[in-house]
């Protein structure tokens, strides 16, 4: 499926892994792009980061994470292609791909998505678990009003970690897509200890 905005997680990780970034503190100008790209799903910030990165760092991350179905797309980042399995691999071992100095920053972004975008897995999260996630949504690529609505996430509690990725296509509306995400997430997470 096309990634829509869930590819922004890959963009965040790829940016933090770059040689000129990995061994230093982030500049305020970088934080001013990366934070809204994740927390508010800011597309302008994402386009700036995407153009700064180029193809190689994103594809390198996909290779390192064992993503077998990821396909880069330019100039429209939201048209990259992926599978739920690929994204679940990345989310399950999220910190493995990020330099230690940037782990807290990256986790904080995924943990502080704005309230207006906290649906689906955010509504289904069991008590006692931390949630780190990103959503992606929009009209279908066929030009119809059918929607894609995705979420990539990991939940953790003490030494336990669960990754969950739900990719939907052809929803008649975003409300329908959001409800689908929540219903699927509730079923997948219902047996987690509370």
Image: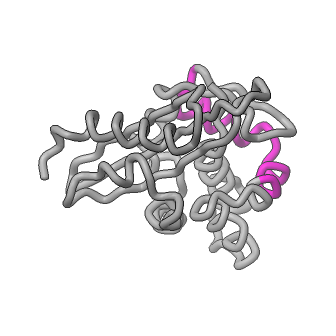
> On the rendered structure, is 52 left or right of 150?
right
Toward the viewer: 1 or 16?
1
Residue 91 location, x and y as percent? 45, 42
Q: Where is residue 189 in the image (x, y as percent from the top left)?
A: 25, 40
Identity of the residue drawn at 51% across and 28% down: 86
Determine whether, in the image, residue 5 is placed left or right of residue 176: right
User: Does residue 89 show up?
Assistant: yes
Q: In which quarter of the image is residue 173?
A: top right
Depicted 173 relative to depicted 159: above or below: above
Numbered label tally: 0
Reply yes or no: does residue 42 show up in magenta. no
Residue 18 position in % (x across, y down): 69, 53
Tell me which colouring the rendered structure shows.
one colour
Q: Is residue 20 left or right of residue 177?
A: right
Q: Quadrant of the N terminus?
A: top right
Q: Nearer the viewer, residue 81 or 15?
A: 81
49 relative to 70, above or below? below
Whole-percent x, y for residue 145 in the image: 70, 33
- Classify residue 178 as left or right of residue 22: left
Q: From which residue to which does the magenta span run?
A: 47-68
Name the residue rendered at 82%, 57% in the picture. 48
Q: Which residue is drawn at 57% across and 34% down?
A: 64
Residue at x 74% of width, y 33% of height: 79
Up/down of 36 relative to 87, above or below: below
Q: Choose top left, top right, bottom left or bottom right for residue 36.
A: bottom right
């Amino acid at each position: 499926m096309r990634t829509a905005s869930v590819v922004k997680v890959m963009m965040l990780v790829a940016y933090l892994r770059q040689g000129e970034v990995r061994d230093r503190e982030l500049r305020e100008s970088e934080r001013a792009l990366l934070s809204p790209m994740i927390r508010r799903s800011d597309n302008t910030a994402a386009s700036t980061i995407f153009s700064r990165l180029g193809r190689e760092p994103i594809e390198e991350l996909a290779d390192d994470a064992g993503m077998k179905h990821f396909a880069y797309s330019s100039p429209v980042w939201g048209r990259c292609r992926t599978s739920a399995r690929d994204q679940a691999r990345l989310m399950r071992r999220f910190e493995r791909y990020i330099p230690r100095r940037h782990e807290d920053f990256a986790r904080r972004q995924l943990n502080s998505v704005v309230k207006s975008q906290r649906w689906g897995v955010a509504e289904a999260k069991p008590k006692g678990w931390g949630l780190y996630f990103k959503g992606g949504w929009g009209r279908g690529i066929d030009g119809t009003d059918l929607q894609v609505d995705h979420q990539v996430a990991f939940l953790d509690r003490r030494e336990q970690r669960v990754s969950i990725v739900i990719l939907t296509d052809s929803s008649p509306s975003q409300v329908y897509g959001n409800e689908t995400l929540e219903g699927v997430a509730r079923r997948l997470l219902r047996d987690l200890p509370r």
